[in-house]
Amino acid sequence: MEAPLASENVLRVRISEFLVARPPAILRVSGLGSCVALGLFDPKAGLAGLAHILLPGPAPDSVRGSEDPRVNRYKYADQAIEGLLQAMEREGATLAEVKAKIAGGSTMFSQEDGFGDARTIKDGIGARNVEAVKAKLAELNIPIAGEDSGGKSGRTISFDPATGIMSITTKRSEAVEI
Amino acid sequence: MNQPLTYEDLELREVEYDALREISNIGMGHAATALNQMIGKTVILTIPEVALVSLKDLPDFVGGTEKIVIGIYLKVWGDVTGDILMVFPRKSALALCALLTGGAPEDELVLSEMHSSALREIGNILASSYLAALERLLGKTLIPSVPGIAFDMAGAVVDYILIQVGEAVDQTLVIKAAFKGNDHGVKGNFYLMPDPNSLKIILDAAKMLASQRNGERNR
Protein backbone atom coordinates (compact mmCIF):
# COMPACT_ATOMS: atom_id res chain seq x y z
CA MET A 1 0.00 0.00 0.00
CA GLU A 2 3.07 2.26 -0.23
CA ALA A 3 2.79 5.06 -2.73
CA PRO A 4 3.05 3.43 -6.17
CA LEU A 5 5.06 6.20 -7.77
CA ALA A 6 8.08 7.32 -5.83
CA SER A 7 8.89 9.91 -8.43
CA GLU A 8 11.04 12.82 -7.44
CA ASN A 9 8.22 14.98 -8.74
CA VAL A 10 6.13 13.95 -5.77
CA LEU A 11 6.73 16.32 -2.88
CA ARG A 12 5.63 15.05 0.48
CA VAL A 13 4.14 17.50 2.96
CA ARG A 14 4.56 16.39 6.55
CA ILE A 15 2.58 17.43 9.62
CA SER A 16 2.81 21.16 10.35
CA GLU A 17 4.47 21.88 7.00
CA PHE A 18 3.31 23.45 3.76
CA LEU A 19 4.81 23.48 0.28
CA VAL A 20 4.21 25.49 -2.87
CA ALA A 21 4.79 23.88 -6.26
CA ARG A 22 4.38 24.30 -10.01
CA PRO A 23 3.78 21.55 -12.60
CA PRO A 24 4.99 18.90 -13.14
CA ALA A 25 5.44 18.48 -9.38
CA ILE A 26 2.67 16.79 -7.40
CA LEU A 27 2.06 17.61 -3.75
CA ARG A 28 1.24 14.74 -1.44
CA VAL A 29 0.08 14.06 2.10
CA SER A 30 0.14 10.38 2.98
CA GLY A 31 -1.66 8.82 5.91
CA LEU A 32 -3.94 11.69 6.87
CA GLY A 33 -6.31 11.00 9.77
CA SER A 34 -7.84 13.74 11.91
CA CYS A 35 -5.44 16.28 10.42
CA VAL A 36 -6.56 18.39 7.48
CA ALA A 37 -4.86 18.77 4.11
CA LEU A 38 -5.64 22.20 2.69
CA GLY A 39 -4.85 22.78 -0.96
CA LEU A 40 -4.80 26.28 -2.44
CA PHE A 41 -4.38 26.87 -6.17
CA ASP A 42 -4.23 29.80 -8.51
CA PRO A 43 -5.03 28.55 -12.02
CA LYS A 44 -3.88 31.81 -13.68
CA ALA A 45 -0.50 31.83 -11.96
CA GLY A 46 -0.23 28.06 -12.51
CA LEU A 47 0.80 27.15 -9.00
CA ALA A 48 -0.56 25.44 -5.96
CA GLY A 49 0.24 24.86 -2.33
CA LEU A 50 -0.64 22.21 0.21
CA ALA A 51 -0.66 22.50 4.02
CA HIS A 52 -0.82 19.61 6.50
CA ILE A 53 -2.67 21.04 9.50
CA LEU A 54 -2.63 19.38 12.93
CA LEU A 55 -4.63 21.66 15.23
CA PRO A 56 -7.67 23.93 14.94
CA GLY A 57 -6.10 26.67 17.06
CA PRO A 58 -6.33 29.60 17.21
CA ALA A 59 -2.57 29.73 17.73
CA PRO A 60 -1.56 31.23 21.10
CA ASP A 61 -0.11 34.75 21.01
CA SER A 62 3.36 33.46 21.86
CA VAL A 63 3.35 31.43 18.65
CA ARG A 64 1.45 33.70 16.25
CA GLY A 65 3.79 35.13 13.63
CA SER A 66 6.87 33.75 15.42
CA GLU A 67 10.03 33.42 13.35
CA ASP A 68 11.73 31.18 15.93
CA PRO A 69 12.63 27.97 14.06
CA ARG A 70 11.95 25.89 17.18
CA VAL A 71 8.35 27.11 17.23
CA ASN A 72 6.20 24.99 14.99
CA ARG A 73 3.47 27.54 14.36
CA TYR A 74 2.21 26.04 11.11
CA LYS A 75 0.63 23.18 13.04
CA TYR A 76 -2.29 25.59 13.62
CA ALA A 77 -4.94 26.12 10.94
CA ASP A 78 -4.85 29.94 10.98
CA GLN A 79 -1.03 30.18 10.88
CA ALA A 80 -0.70 27.52 8.18
CA ILE A 81 -3.24 29.17 5.88
CA GLU A 82 -1.69 32.62 6.29
CA GLY A 83 1.80 31.21 5.76
CA LEU A 84 0.82 29.20 2.71
CA LEU A 85 -1.03 32.11 1.11
CA GLN A 86 1.93 34.46 1.65
CA ALA A 87 4.32 31.92 0.16
CA MET A 88 2.07 31.57 -2.90
CA GLU A 89 1.76 35.34 -3.29
CA ARG A 90 5.56 35.61 -3.27
CA GLU A 91 5.54 33.15 -6.17
CA GLY A 92 3.04 35.24 -8.11
CA ALA A 93 -0.39 34.09 -6.92
CA THR A 94 -3.20 36.63 -6.49
CA LEU A 95 -5.62 36.26 -3.58
CA ALA A 96 -8.65 37.00 -5.78
CA GLU A 97 -7.79 34.03 -8.02
CA VAL A 98 -7.07 31.52 -5.27
CA LYS A 99 -9.42 28.58 -4.65
CA ALA A 100 -9.29 25.99 -1.90
CA LYS A 101 -9.76 22.23 -1.57
CA ILE A 102 -10.06 20.47 1.76
CA ALA A 103 -9.61 16.83 2.77
CA GLY A 104 -9.21 14.97 6.05
CA GLY A 105 -10.72 15.51 9.49
CA SER A 106 -11.63 11.87 10.13
CA THR A 107 -12.54 10.19 13.39
CA MET A 108 -9.91 7.46 13.65
CA PHE A 109 -10.68 5.76 16.94
CA SER A 110 -14.03 4.18 17.63
CA GLN A 111 -14.42 5.55 21.14
CA GLU A 112 -12.45 8.74 21.29
CA ASP A 113 -14.70 10.16 23.98
CA GLY A 114 -13.71 7.31 26.30
CA PHE A 115 -10.14 8.61 26.62
CA GLY A 116 -10.39 11.95 28.23
CA ASP A 117 -11.36 13.89 31.24
CA ALA A 118 -12.65 17.45 31.07
CA ARG A 119 -9.13 18.85 30.64
CA THR A 120 -8.10 17.01 27.55
CA ILE A 121 -11.23 15.70 25.88
CA LYS A 122 -11.03 16.39 22.16
CA ASP A 123 -14.44 15.42 20.91
CA GLY A 124 -14.63 15.40 17.16
CA ILE A 125 -11.18 16.91 16.76
CA GLY A 126 -11.25 16.12 13.04
CA ALA A 127 -14.48 18.08 12.58
CA ARG A 128 -13.06 20.97 14.60
CA ASN A 129 -10.02 21.05 12.37
CA VAL A 130 -12.22 21.26 9.27
CA GLU A 131 -14.34 24.03 10.82
CA ALA A 132 -11.27 26.04 11.76
CA VAL A 133 -9.92 25.79 8.22
CA LYS A 134 -13.26 26.89 6.75
CA ALA A 135 -13.52 29.82 9.15
CA LYS A 136 -10.08 31.09 8.13
CA LEU A 137 -10.86 30.65 4.43
CA ALA A 138 -14.11 32.60 4.89
CA GLU A 139 -12.20 35.39 6.62
CA LEU A 140 -9.87 35.61 3.61
CA ASN A 141 -12.76 35.27 1.11
CA ILE A 142 -11.20 32.19 -0.46
CA PRO A 143 -13.90 30.00 -2.08
CA ILE A 144 -13.93 26.25 -1.40
CA ALA A 145 -13.93 24.41 -4.71
CA GLY A 146 -14.02 20.90 -3.30
CA GLU A 147 -14.13 18.98 -0.05
CA ASP A 148 -13.80 15.37 1.12
CA SER A 149 -13.82 15.40 4.89
CA GLY A 150 -15.06 13.51 7.93
CA GLY A 151 -15.83 9.80 8.06
CA LYS A 152 -13.76 7.11 9.74
CA SER A 153 -10.98 6.42 7.26
CA GLY A 154 -7.49 7.72 6.77
CA ARG A 155 -6.70 9.31 3.42
CA THR A 156 -3.75 9.79 1.12
CA ILE A 157 -3.93 12.95 -0.95
CA SER A 158 -2.26 14.05 -4.16
CA PHE A 159 -2.71 17.62 -5.33
CA ASP A 160 -1.83 18.55 -8.89
CA PRO A 161 -0.79 22.17 -9.49
CA ALA A 162 -1.42 21.71 -13.23
CA THR A 163 -5.15 21.12 -12.77
CA GLY A 164 -6.00 21.94 -9.16
CA ILE A 165 -7.39 18.40 -8.89
CA MET A 166 -7.05 16.73 -5.52
CA SER A 167 -7.04 12.96 -5.72
CA ILE A 168 -7.88 11.01 -2.57
CA THR A 169 -7.45 7.33 -1.74
CA THR A 170 -8.38 5.40 1.39
CA LYS A 171 -7.44 1.85 2.32
CA ARG A 172 -10.72 0.65 0.85
CA SER A 173 -11.47 2.86 -2.10
CA GLU A 174 -10.23 3.73 -5.55
CA ALA A 175 -9.11 7.30 -5.98
CA VAL A 176 -11.80 9.98 -5.67
CA GLU A 177 -11.17 13.32 -7.33
CA ILE A 178 -12.34 16.68 -6.09
CA MET B 1 0.79 23.80 39.93
CA ASN B 2 4.27 24.27 38.53
CA GLN B 3 4.88 25.74 35.12
CA PRO B 4 4.44 22.97 32.52
CA LEU B 5 7.78 21.57 31.47
CA THR B 6 9.01 20.88 27.98
CA TYR B 7 11.30 17.98 27.20
CA GLU B 8 14.11 20.47 26.55
CA ASP B 9 13.85 21.67 30.17
CA LEU B 10 14.72 18.18 31.35
CA GLU B 11 18.07 18.18 29.51
CA LEU B 12 18.08 14.44 29.06
CA ARG B 13 21.49 12.74 29.08
CA GLU B 14 22.59 9.18 28.48
CA VAL B 15 22.04 8.26 32.13
CA GLU B 16 18.37 9.24 31.86
CA TYR B 17 17.94 7.38 28.58
CA ASP B 18 19.46 4.31 30.26
CA ALA B 19 17.03 4.57 33.16
CA LEU B 20 14.09 4.81 30.75
CA ARG B 21 15.28 1.80 28.75
CA GLU B 22 15.60 -0.17 31.98
CA ILE B 23 12.10 0.80 33.11
CA SER B 24 10.69 -0.06 29.72
CA ASN B 25 12.41 -3.45 29.82
CA ILE B 26 10.81 -4.31 33.13
CA GLY B 27 7.36 -3.12 32.07
CA MET B 28 7.55 -4.83 28.72
CA GLY B 29 8.81 -8.05 30.32
CA HIS B 30 5.60 -8.26 32.30
CA ALA B 31 3.50 -7.40 29.26
CA ALA B 32 5.23 -10.10 27.19
CA THR B 33 4.64 -12.69 29.92
CA ALA B 34 0.95 -11.85 29.87
CA LEU B 35 0.88 -12.15 26.08
CA ASN B 36 2.74 -15.49 26.21
CA GLN B 37 0.12 -16.86 28.56
CA MET B 38 -2.78 -15.59 26.49
CA ILE B 39 -1.66 -17.01 23.17
CA GLY B 40 0.33 -19.98 24.53
CA LYS B 41 3.35 -19.00 22.42
CA THR B 42 6.66 -17.40 23.18
CA VAL B 43 7.12 -13.72 22.47
CA ILE B 44 10.63 -12.28 22.25
CA LEU B 45 11.50 -8.71 23.19
CA THR B 46 14.11 -6.51 21.58
CA ILE B 47 16.13 -3.82 23.34
CA PRO B 48 13.94 -0.77 23.88
CA GLU B 49 14.61 2.49 22.08
CA VAL B 50 14.16 5.88 23.68
CA ALA B 51 14.09 8.96 21.48
CA LEU B 52 12.92 12.54 21.33
CA VAL B 53 10.95 12.71 18.10
CA SER B 54 9.52 15.83 16.48
CA LEU B 55 5.81 15.72 15.72
CA LYS B 56 6.39 15.70 11.97
CA ASP B 57 8.77 12.72 12.22
CA LEU B 58 6.60 10.54 14.45
CA PRO B 59 4.54 8.94 11.63
CA ASP B 60 7.76 7.68 10.01
CA PHE B 61 9.15 6.62 13.40
CA VAL B 62 6.06 4.46 13.87
CA GLY B 63 6.76 2.68 10.62
CA GLY B 64 5.65 4.58 7.55
CA THR B 65 2.63 6.72 6.89
CA GLU B 66 0.72 4.55 4.43
CA LYS B 67 1.32 1.11 5.89
CA ILE B 68 -1.94 -0.49 7.03
CA VAL B 69 -1.75 -1.26 10.72
CA ILE B 70 -3.88 -1.91 13.72
CA GLY B 71 -3.34 0.75 16.34
CA ILE B 72 -4.54 0.40 19.91
CA TYR B 73 -4.45 3.59 21.89
CA LEU B 74 -4.85 4.28 25.60
CA LYS B 75 -4.35 7.26 27.81
CA VAL B 76 -2.49 6.89 31.09
CA TRP B 77 -3.92 8.56 34.17
CA GLY B 78 -2.69 8.92 37.74
CA ASP B 79 0.54 10.36 39.14
CA VAL B 80 2.07 9.78 35.73
CA THR B 81 0.10 10.81 32.64
CA GLY B 82 0.80 10.13 29.00
CA ASP B 83 -0.18 8.03 26.01
CA ILE B 84 0.30 4.41 25.03
CA LEU B 85 0.11 3.24 21.43
CA MET B 86 0.47 -0.35 20.28
CA VAL B 87 0.96 -0.93 16.58
CA PHE B 88 0.50 -4.31 14.94
CA PRO B 89 1.14 -4.80 11.23
CA ARG B 90 -2.06 -6.02 9.60
CA LYS B 91 -0.92 -9.62 9.07
CA SER B 92 0.38 -9.83 12.61
CA ALA B 93 -2.89 -8.58 14.07
CA LEU B 94 -4.86 -11.12 12.05
CA ALA B 95 -2.47 -13.90 13.18
CA LEU B 96 -3.03 -12.76 16.74
CA CYS B 97 -6.80 -12.88 16.23
CA ALA B 98 -6.49 -16.42 14.86
CA LEU B 99 -4.48 -17.56 17.90
CA LEU B 100 -6.98 -15.99 20.28
CA THR B 101 -10.19 -17.10 18.67
CA GLY B 102 -8.99 -20.43 17.30
CA GLY B 103 -9.95 -19.63 13.72
CA ALA B 104 -7.79 -19.27 10.64
CA PRO B 105 -6.60 -15.74 9.87
CA GLU B 106 -9.00 -14.04 7.50
CA ASP B 107 -7.90 -11.24 5.25
CA GLU B 108 -10.19 -8.53 6.48
CA LEU B 109 -10.32 -4.91 5.48
CA VAL B 110 -12.85 -4.21 8.16
CA LEU B 111 -12.30 -5.83 11.54
CA SER B 112 -15.15 -8.02 12.71
CA GLU B 113 -16.66 -7.14 16.07
CA MET B 114 -15.14 -10.29 17.57
CA HIS B 115 -11.63 -9.54 16.34
CA SER B 116 -11.86 -5.92 17.27
CA SER B 117 -12.86 -6.76 20.81
CA ALA B 118 -10.20 -9.50 21.09
CA LEU B 119 -7.49 -7.05 20.02
CA ARG B 120 -8.78 -4.37 22.34
CA GLU B 121 -8.60 -6.89 25.17
CA ILE B 122 -5.01 -7.72 24.22
CA GLY B 123 -4.21 -4.01 24.30
CA ASN B 124 -5.85 -3.68 27.66
CA ILE B 125 -3.90 -6.59 29.16
CA LEU B 126 -0.55 -5.53 27.68
CA ALA B 127 -0.96 -1.96 28.88
CA SER B 128 -2.25 -2.99 32.32
CA SER B 129 0.64 -5.40 32.95
CA TYR B 130 3.18 -2.86 31.70
CA LEU B 131 1.77 -0.11 33.89
CA ALA B 132 1.34 -2.38 36.94
CA ALA B 133 5.04 -3.24 36.75
CA LEU B 134 5.95 0.45 36.56
CA GLU B 135 3.61 1.19 39.44
CA ARG B 136 5.39 -1.36 41.68
CA LEU B 137 8.79 -0.18 40.55
CA LEU B 138 8.24 3.56 40.89
CA GLY B 139 5.69 3.66 43.69
CA LYS B 140 3.47 5.88 41.51
CA THR B 141 -0.09 5.39 40.32
CA LEU B 142 -0.59 4.63 36.62
CA ILE B 143 -4.07 3.78 35.35
CA PRO B 144 -4.90 2.87 31.74
CA SER B 145 -8.01 4.26 30.02
CA VAL B 146 -10.39 2.18 27.93
CA PRO B 147 -8.50 1.27 24.73
CA GLY B 148 -9.51 2.63 21.36
CA ILE B 149 -8.76 0.74 18.18
CA ALA B 150 -8.13 1.86 14.62
CA PHE B 151 -7.39 -0.20 11.52
CA ASP B 152 -5.93 2.11 8.93
CA MET B 153 -2.82 3.81 7.57
CA ALA B 154 -0.19 4.27 10.28
CA GLY B 155 0.04 8.01 9.63
CA ALA B 156 -3.69 8.44 10.09
CA VAL B 157 -3.65 6.43 13.32
CA VAL B 158 -0.79 8.45 14.74
CA ASP B 159 -2.04 11.92 13.88
CA TYR B 160 -4.89 11.63 16.38
CA ILE B 161 -2.30 11.08 19.11
CA LEU B 162 -0.20 13.98 17.84
CA ILE B 163 -3.27 16.19 18.15
CA GLN B 164 -3.53 15.13 21.81
CA VAL B 165 0.06 16.14 22.56
CA GLY B 166 0.70 18.77 19.88
CA GLU B 167 -0.86 21.72 21.68
CA ALA B 168 1.73 21.50 24.47
CA VAL B 169 4.89 20.30 22.74
CA ASP B 170 6.64 20.23 19.33
CA GLN B 171 8.48 17.02 20.05
CA THR B 172 7.64 14.05 22.17
CA LEU B 173 9.66 11.51 24.10
CA VAL B 174 8.92 8.02 22.85
CA ILE B 175 9.88 4.83 24.68
CA LYS B 176 9.58 2.06 22.13
CA ALA B 177 9.64 -1.68 22.72
CA ALA B 178 9.32 -4.24 19.93
CA PHE B 179 8.12 -7.82 20.39
CA LYS B 180 7.85 -10.73 18.00
CA GLY B 181 7.28 -14.46 17.88
CA ASN B 182 9.58 -17.07 16.40
CA ASP B 183 7.06 -19.17 14.56
CA HIS B 184 3.66 -17.58 14.77
CA GLY B 185 3.88 -14.27 12.89
CA VAL B 186 2.81 -12.12 15.82
CA LYS B 187 4.85 -8.95 16.07
CA GLY B 188 4.27 -5.43 17.11
CA ASN B 189 5.56 -2.30 18.75
CA PHE B 190 4.62 -0.77 22.06
CA TYR B 191 5.11 2.98 22.53
CA LEU B 192 4.88 4.88 25.80
CA MET B 193 4.86 8.66 25.58
CA PRO B 194 4.97 10.22 29.04
CA ASP B 195 4.21 13.94 29.10
CA PRO B 196 7.15 16.14 30.21
CA ASN B 197 6.00 16.62 33.82
CA SER B 198 5.41 12.88 34.18
CA LEU B 199 8.76 12.12 32.66
CA LYS B 200 10.36 14.13 35.45
CA ILE B 201 8.39 12.12 38.04
CA ILE B 202 9.52 8.86 36.41
CA LEU B 203 13.16 9.94 36.29
CA ASP B 204 13.16 11.18 39.90
CA ALA B 205 11.66 7.89 41.08
CA ALA B 206 14.17 5.94 39.00
CA LYS B 207 17.06 7.88 40.52
CA MET B 208 15.79 7.24 44.02
CA LEU B 209 15.46 3.56 43.21
CA ALA B 210 19.01 3.42 41.85
CA SER B 211 20.46 5.13 44.92
CA GLN B 212 18.51 2.79 47.22
CA ARG B 213 19.91 -0.18 45.38
CA ASN B 214 23.44 1.21 45.63
CA GLY B 215 22.90 1.84 49.35
CA GLU B 216 21.83 -1.77 49.88
CA ARG B 217 24.80 -3.00 47.92
CA ASN B 218 27.24 -0.94 50.01
CA ARG B 219 25.78 -1.92 53.35
Image (spheres, coloured by chain):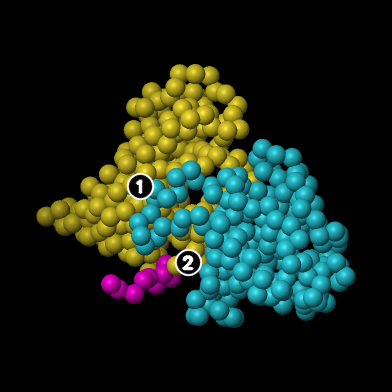
Q: Residue at x 37, y 62 (%)?
A: A119
Dot 2, crowdedness within 10 Å: few (<14), some or many (≥20)? some
The residue segment tinted magenta is B1-9
Determine the CA span between mark 1 and mark 2.
21 Å
Q: Earlier in the sequence, mark 1 or mark 2?
A: 1
The cyan-tinted chain is A
Q: Judge whether residue B140 can be spotted in this image.
A: yes
Letter of the chain that mark 1 sits on in the rendering: B
For the image shown, how many numbered marks are present on the structure? Answer: 2
Q: Is residue A141 above or below residue B97?
A: below
Q: Are marks 1 and 2 in contact (CB under 8 Å)?
A: no
Q: Is residue A85 left or right of residue A47?
A: left
> What residue does disc 2 label?
B167
Q: Quadrant of the N terminus of chain A?
A: top right
Q: Is residue B202 found inside the magenta-colored segment of the image?
A: no
Quarter-of-image position of residue A118: bottom left
What is the secondary structure assignment of the residue under circle 2? loop
Residue at the image position 34 percent from the left and 65 percent from the top: B197
Extreme top residue here? B103
Q: 10 Å neighbourhood of mark 1: few (<14), some, or many (≥20)?
A: some
Residue A126 sits in quarter: bottom right
Q: Secondary structure at mark 1?
A: loop
Which quadrant would residue A67 be assigned to in this image? bottom right
Query: For this view, does B110 lie left or right of residue A175?
Result: left
Residue position for label 1: B145
The chain painted yellow is B
Inspect the image, locate mark 1, and give the three-letter code of the amino acid beneath it.
Ser
Comparing B130 with B217, the one in front is B130
State whether the magenta stretch is mostly helix, strand or loop.
Answer: loop
